[in-house]
Amino acid sequence: MCLLISCNSQDRQIAKIRAEIEAEKAAQQARLEQYADSTVYLSFKGIELGQPFLKTIQKVRSHQDISNMQLNKDKTSATCQAKIYLPNRSNALDVDVKIASFQDTITSFLIMSTDYDTREDLKLLYTSRYDELFSSKEKDEGYWGDKAQRSNSHSLLWTFKNQSLRFTTFLRETRENYVKNPKMRSPENRYGVKYTNYFEAITIIYSDIYHCKKVEEYEAELKAAAEHLESLARKEKQKADSINRVKINQRAENQDF
């Protein structure tokens, strides 16, 4: 009887935990859908997604937090440095910014920081504004193989109806063997593996979903056109080679010997 009661109590506890997990999954999905149905206009220091590229570049050159603005040769992208003000810190964080465009429209821009000391404050700045509960999480771990190190990244992704924001932390993970217990003879008991993560950078990518899709379609068209031209060139070469072989064979057959 005691055993039966104990088993029933354990089953109820497991069922309760499972119900709580399912409820949290449903709540998370509802939060993601709420953001996915929202239209936003994301911007950074006057750089706004979906706005005219060259006009924006000209305007933000004079922004007090923007410096060293440089256009590329084709005037389709630009780089600059910017200052971000973090809570509880008197000094601003200097970050690198790259702005991309398509048909003179800002499609995306990337902010990058390699400062170790401010990494948590920078993350807090964004999770406080956009709420981490409304983000989806992604992890990308490199393949170990026989290497002593690999690259890792962890992302928070906020996806709205028209735009998205991705906050990614890049790490370099190393592993090395060490003597865990010198008294043991078997390798699995004598040695252990030590894993260490090293911070490399944080990137924050603002993207306009509609215009990025147009870029992808345009690039796909360019790729298809290039493949078609390559196919035509191969056929022309094959035809020319075939004609040349016929001429060579005819010359060999018709010679006086």
Image (cartoon, rainbow, N blue to C red):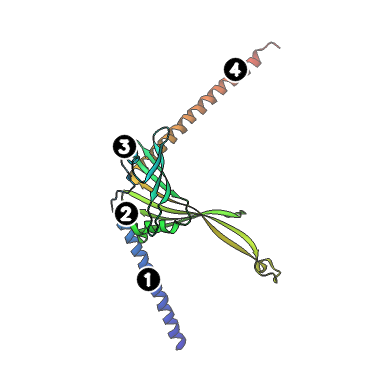
Kind of element beneath mark 2: helix
Q: Nearer the viewer, residue 62 or 49?
A: 62
Indicate the position of residue 244 as horizontal and vertical percent values.
Answer: 58, 20
Contact, mark 4 vs mark 2 (Cβ under 8 Å): no
Kind of element beneath mark 3: helix
Horizontal side of 251 relative to 102 (left or right) equals right
Q: Residue furthest front?
A: 90
Q: Nearer the viewer, residue 225 or 134?
A: 134
Mark 2 or mark 1, earlier in chain? 1
Residue named by callout 2: 36
Q: Considering the image in quadrants, where does the C terminus appear?
A: top right
Residue at position x 45%, y 82% from top? 7
Q: Residue furthest bottom?
A: 1
Q: Which of the labelled discs sits on residue 247, or is there none? A: 4
Mark 2 or mark 3, earlier in chain? 2
> For the residues carrying marks 1 and 4, which lies nearer the camera in this image?
1
| Residue 156 in view, yes or no | yes
At label 2, which amino acid type do we have?
Answer: Ala
Horizontal side of 47 relative to 203 (left or right) equals left
Cα–Cα span, label 2 and label 3: 29 Å
